[in-house]
Amino acid sequence: MILSVHKKASGFSLKLFLSICITILFSNCEILSPAEQKAAAEDARTLQAVSAEAEPETAENAFNWIKIADGIEHCSFFDETSHSRCNAVRINLDTPNLKLIASMPVEEAEEGGTSIFKAETTKKFAQRNSAIVAVNVTPFNYPSGRASKKRTIAGVYAVNDKILAPRAGRYAALIFAAGKDGSLSAGILDTQNDFEPDSTTRFAFGGFWTLLKDGRIIMFKSQQKEPRTAAGILDNGKTLILLAIDKSGSTSKGATFNETSSILLKLGATEAIMLDGGSSSSLIINGRQISKTFPHVEVALSFGFLLD
């Protein structure tokens, strides 16, 4: 009798575990369904720029930055406001021999069309390219269903002067340009409609919305806490911060948009953009998954840095 009860309990536990995994996989990833696009658009209309309540702490004093390569530093910390574990990478874009890499489509679209990407985790992308650091970036869709390896991205993607995926005007974009000396600088456009590639463009990535503008938080009404991936810039675009916020049970609660903005402000960013989050959220350092959100889905587009 006891053995029978144990077997039933074991079977129930397995079913419960599988149910939880499936729920996380299909509900936690920030992929743009029509309903989500409508809700996102409504939320975007609630934005208003407000001054930060306090001066941000200097990134040097508030966080323990550890060098992982020339021009690249990492810090891990617990944010008390959001009750979340966070990992951030700070990259000096002036670093000699620094190279920015990104996923490339397997089927390149004609002008104005949407290219097809092969599904791949950010970890696999980083390992395949020997990237020192890598992060997921643009939200995506499943054009042939979730079981397919095909992905399309929901936002602009440009490499040099070529646009490989069309603009999503309601969302912001993260732009990387090269100066005359070849060094990179980063910038954020509030709307992808403002992006036009030129001879200085190296990459343009679509994200969600602008979080920080001129050192001011852009406030959102939504209070939903999720795993988050975001990028911030400072030093007139010469320093990039990549941020991943975990959501894992009781130990890390995830963050709202506003909490993410506040963390980036404390890290020293003056401009920032929200990237794809949920179970897409991934930060990889030297081939190892640093962010702890589970599971990490196969995304369409990741980018990273290495030293030539």
Image (cartoon, rainbow, N blue to C red):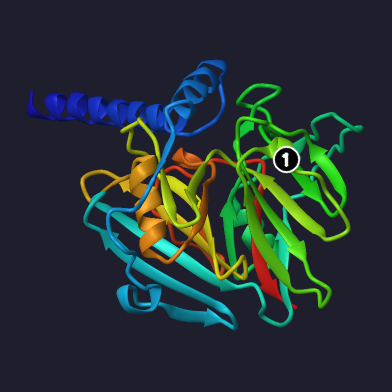
Residue at 43 percent across and 66 percent down: it is 268
Give the quarter of the image for residue 155: top right
User: Which amino acid type corresponds to the residue marked 1 in the rendered image?
Assistant: Asp
Where residue 286 sits in the image (x, y, percent)?
A: 56, 70
Q: Which residue is mark 1?
A: 194
The image quadrant where one finds the N terminus is top left
Lateral position of residue 80 relative to residue 131, left or right: left
The image quadrant where one finds the C terminus is bottom right
Where residue 27 sits in the image (x, y, percent)?
A: 43, 27
Q: Nearer the viewer, residue 301 or 222?
A: 222
| Secondary structure beneath label 1 | helix
Q: Nearer the viewer, residue 244 or 169?
A: 169
**Relative vertical location of residue 184 with respect to residue 194 in this rendering, above or below:** below
**Relative vertical location of residue 170 with respect to residue 72 in this rendering, above or below:** above
Where residue 294 sits in the image (x, y, percent)?
A: 41, 44
Lateral position of residue 298 relative to residue 219, left or right: right
Residue at 72 percent across and 55 percent down: it is 102
Residue at 31 percent across and 25 percent down: it is 15
Give the quarter of the image for residue 147: top right
How many labels sit on residues?
1
**Relative vertical location of residue 225 with respect to residue 239 in this rendering, above or below:** above
Residue at 72 percent across and 40 percent down: it is 194
**Relative vertical location of residue 81 with respect to residue 75 in this rendering, above or below:** above
Q: In this rendering, does residue 156 appear at all? A: no
Disc 1 crowd, CA 10 A, few/some/many (<14, 14-19, 20+) = few
Q: In this rendering, does residue 93 appear at all? A: yes
Where residue 64 sits in the image (x, y, percent)?
A: 35, 77
Among all residues in the image, which is located at the extreme left? 2
